[in-house]
Image (cartoon, rainbow, N blue to C red):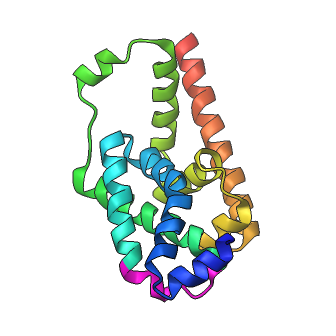
Amino acid sequence: MNEFELAKRAIKRDEQAFLEIIHLYKEALYRTAFAFLKNEHDAIEAVQEVTVRAYKKIHTVKKPHFLKTWLIRIMMNYCQDQLRKKKRFTSSEELQELGNETNYIYLEIEEALAILPEAEQRLIHLMYFQDTKIKDIAVIENIPEGTVKSRLHKTLRTLRSFLSEKGDADNV
């Protein structure tokens, strides 16, 4: 059975179809959660919580072919709520543990992403960490595809500028 048929059955509250849909999309949901929460345990917990929330509200999905984007959107909202609640800070001990160059590059990228507003961070995560297509991002964010493209262009320009200034500062 194809994804569209499974989605239609799941929306009609077919439990087996819902479980198959979750199984199909669990990796994408986990990657989304991990990209936001940066912790395996929290990402697994997020997948569990989003599964429960989706099961309760699956009947509200109007178009079966957007079920995956609907699930990803629930995950993004859940993760953002968790981040707001926790207001995580990296301790100096954690920074000392990050000793190799790969982790420094990762930290620089995370630092650059942190300067962006939440909407732009979400856009970068969807496009580059989740490999989401522009048309799907437009559906998730409820904006036209052209707006997605222009925001991506502006966001990438901001990131390039930040990283090049940081590079210049390191060479001085």
Return the x and y of residue 149 as percentages of the image width and height: 74, 60
- Residue 44 appears anywhere in the view: yes
- The residue at 64%/46% (across/down) is 128
Position of the N terminus, as image quadrant, is bottom right
Q: Pick the residue in front: 9 or 35.
A: 9
- The overriding secondary structure of the stretch rendered in magenta is helix
Q: Pick the residue in front: 128 or 167.
A: 128
Q: Pick the residue in front: 65 or 21.
A: 21
Q: Is residue 16 above or below residue 89?
A: below
Position of the C terminus, as image quadrant, is top right
User: Does residue 123 appear left or right of residue 108 in this picture?
Assistant: right
Return the x and y of residue 65 as percentages of the image width and height: 66, 77
Q: Is residue 102 above or below residue 30?
A: above
Q: For the magenta stretch, what is the residue range?
A: 56-64
Return the x and y of residue 73 as percentages of the image width and height: 50, 67
Q: Is residue 130 magenta?
A: no
